Image (cartoon, rainbow, N blue to C red):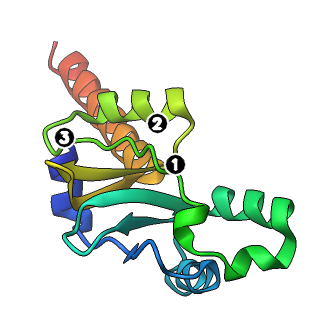
Amino acid sequence: MTVALILAEKGRDVVTVHPDTLMRDAVSELAAKRIGAIVVTDDSGKVRGIISERDIVREIARHGPAALDMAVSACMTRAVMTCAENDTVDHVMGVMTTNRFRHLPVAANGVLSGIVSIGDVVKRKIEQAVRDAEDLRNYIAMS
């Protein structure tokens, strides 16, 4: 299974903000959409960063409530790893596990085309395990 198949099922909608967005507005968006990360893009749609719940907690611990009045660009993770639509679920799971990411933007030439979460990946791995077990049961029953 590939990232493209995940996106075909879950959709390609990604919540984004501009680097100048205030942290308080990003926090409101996270809460309203019940999501854990927002991709930061420029006017052309290129990925410039990602801001996650973890990033926000760290900034509040460091700066207190004043962190909410800072621009997202001051707090976001700038070195964003992305994946491609033709990447496999196994590859993406490895990247996410190794780097301790819960969200991985999908991009082509730096332009955002979707996002996958660790929940999306685990769901597909469980579905595959169930299919494999069923195939094995069917094979044994036919023998």
Quadrant containing the N terminus is top left
Q: Position of residue 97 (x, y in %)?
A: 51, 31
Residue contact between numbered discs 2 and 1, judged by CB atoms under 8 Å: yes
* Disc ID at residue 27: none
> Residue 22 at what x, y percent from top left?
58, 82
Amino acid type shown at disc 2? Met
Q: Secondary structure at mark 2?
A: helix
Query: Is residue 43 shown left or right of residue 50?
Result: left
What residue would you read off at disc 3?
Answer: 2
Q: Residue at x 46, y 36 (%)?
A: 96
Spatial separation of the CA atoms under disc 3 and disc 2: 15 Å
Label 1 neighbour load within 10 Å: few <14, some 14-19, many 20+: some
Q: Looking at the image, is mark 2 or mark 1 earlier in the sequence?
A: 2
Residue beneath label 2, please? 96
| Amino acid at dot 3 | Thr
Q: How far apart in space, not on screen, are marks 1 and 3 (Cα)?
A: 17 Å
Q: Residue at x 62, y 79 (%)?
A: 27
Residue 18 occupies quadrant: bottom left
Crowd rating for badge 2 (residues with CA inside 10 Å; few <14, some 14–19, many 20+): some
Which residue is more in the foreground, 73 or 16?
A: 73
Residue identified by numbered label 1? 102
Name the N-terminal-most of marks 3 and 2: 3
**Mark 1 vs 3, N-terminal side:** 3
